Image (cartoon, rainbow, N blue to C red):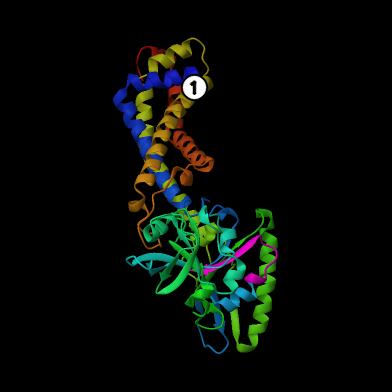
């Protein structure tokens, strides 16, 4: 392998312009693909405090129709009654949480300070089991405080400093929309990219309008995240969910209600790629579109790189002819040229991966401007992006690009006529 690497470097040096244009083209192709992949991955990859995304089952909406309606259906978040009847009755999962669909801007102030706006999310006690926040002061509110509608709150570190000048704020009091709350705990700031966990302040939804903010007895402003104990338990969780929903369906049928299930609850990938509550998820179409895009991003540079590879190898006809004259087999020459090209492609691919990672980290605001969360986009961190999965995808794309761009030129070079090659002819 060391000899292959030396030969690859020598090949780059022998024709610097063609070689570095080829490297830049490969790096650009990998860069474009990896930016696309990373922006998709950040929606599904686990990272704190959403470290259990790979086990989540998510229901953001429910769908209803009624026998008294001539046509149509209604789609919305869920009411507290529905959440109690189905999700809070579940015994199979490790934890279940109900929370409002999105954080809302609230007016926050401390008695002697100036009021300012902060993102507030209404949650239940199970929220702290599904998410893994890092507490730097105090603790989360518990089930008893949630059920009793105690006016307690968990706040982010930056909010605590803005309110009280310190992050050690447990026990202090402040107001949210002119309602007094006591700080139960303080957590490290959360990235806006953690779209289900993000907020500046978290309060029990029993203390807000969310508990009674219903369109009908089943439709409201809540979504639910279920955390199975393991991936193997997901099927059992779905079975219990279906039994409980069937029971609620039977109870509501007399009033004419009929639930439209649409395969809910969804895993995180399906949930992140299902935009409309009134349509069934179509992950096959999503993945097909993704693969078509990747193929286009690979094929276009591969065509250009193939001609450059052919040009580079044509300059080495005499070398190939000498090797053939000394008994080198065509298969051996083909393999050597392929490995040499692969090493160059991998070097270029690493450059593309590094460039895409830097852009994702420092250009988050531009790349993620369409985030559904209100407020400034938090920067990505290497821990959110750099995984063996991402690295493996980058290397896979390098291999595919190398096969597409070098196979034909290498095969043609290996079949060079010895006499013509030694004479410098084609």
Q: Give the quarter of the image for residue 180.
A: bottom left
Visible residue check, residue 76: no
Residue 236, given in percent of the width and then of the height, sits at 70, 62
**Residue shown at 49% from the left, 9% from the top:** 326
What residue is shown at x 66% (from left), y 69% (from top)?
Answer: 241
Residue at image position (38%, 61%) is 163
Give the side of residue 250 with respect to residue 294, left or right: right
On whether residue 89 falls in the magenta region, the answer is yes
Circle 1 residue: 336
Near-viewer residue (279 or 222): 222
Pick whichever, 298 or 266, lies toward us.
266
Q: Is residue 203 above or below residue 131?
A: below
| Label 1 neighbour load within 10 Å: few <14, some 14-19, many 20+ | some
Q: Which residue sits at x=48%, y=27%?
A: 338
**Viewer-side residue, 218 vs 333:** 218
In the rendered image, the vertical position of residue 27 relative to residue 238, given as above or below: above
Question: Which residue is outermost to the top?
Answer: 326
The quadrant where residue 160 appears = bottom left
Range covered by the magenta-colored residues = 87-102
Front in this rendered view, residue 55 or 151: 151
């Amino acid at each position: 392998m060391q000899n292959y690497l030396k030969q690859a470097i020598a090949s780059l040096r022998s024709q610097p312009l063609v070689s570095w244009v080829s490297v830049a083209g490969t790096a650009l192709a990998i860069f474009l693909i990896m930016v696309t992949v990373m922006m998709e991955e950040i929606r599904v990859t686990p990272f704190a405090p959403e470290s259990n995304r790979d086990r989540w089952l998510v229901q953001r909406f429910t769908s209803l129709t009624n026998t008294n309606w001539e046509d149509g259906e209604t789609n919305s978040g869920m009411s507290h009654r529905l959440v109690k009847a189905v999700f809070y009755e579940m015994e199979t999962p490790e934890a279940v949480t109900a929370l409002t669909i999105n954080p809302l801007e609230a007016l926050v102030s401390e008695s002697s300070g100036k009021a300012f706006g902060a993102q507030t999310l209404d949650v239940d006690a199970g929220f702290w089991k599904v998410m893994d926040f890092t507490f730097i002061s105090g603790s989360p509110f518990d089930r008893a405080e949630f059920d009793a509608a105690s006016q307690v709150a968990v706040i982010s570190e930056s909010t605590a400093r803005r309110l009280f000048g310190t992050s050690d704020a447990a026990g202090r009091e402040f107001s949210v929309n002119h309602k007094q709350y006591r700080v139960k705990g303080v957590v490290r700031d959360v990235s806006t990219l953690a779209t289900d966990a993000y907020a500046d302040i978290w309060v029990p939804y029993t203390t807000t309008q969310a508990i009674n903010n219903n369109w009908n007895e089943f439709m409201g402003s809540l979504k639910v995240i279920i955390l199975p104990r393991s991936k193997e338990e997901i099927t059992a969780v779905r079975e219990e969910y279906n039994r409980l929903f069937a029971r609620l369906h039977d109870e509501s049928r007399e009033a004419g209600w009929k639930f439209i299930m649409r395969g809910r609850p969804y895993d995180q990938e399906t949930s992140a790629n299902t935009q409309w509550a009134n349509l069934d998820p179509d992950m096959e179409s999503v993945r097909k579109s993704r693969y078509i895009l990747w193929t286009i991003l690979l094929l276009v540079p591969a065509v250009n790189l193939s001609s450059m590879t052919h040009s580079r190898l044509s300059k080495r006809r005499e070398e190939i002819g000498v090797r053939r004259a000394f008994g080198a087999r065509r298969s051996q020459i083909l393999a050597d040229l392929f490995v040499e090209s692969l090493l160059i492609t991998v070097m270029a691919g690493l450059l593309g991966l590094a460039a895409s990672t830097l852009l994702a980290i420092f250009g988050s605001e531009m790349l993620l401007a369409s985030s559904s969360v209100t407020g400034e986009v938090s920067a990505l961190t290497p821990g959110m992006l750099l995984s063996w999965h991402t690295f493996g995808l980058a290397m896979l794309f390098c291999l595919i690009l190398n096969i597409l761009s070098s196979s034909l030129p290498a095969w043609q070079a290996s079949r060079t006529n010895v006499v013509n090659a030694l004479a410098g002819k084609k």
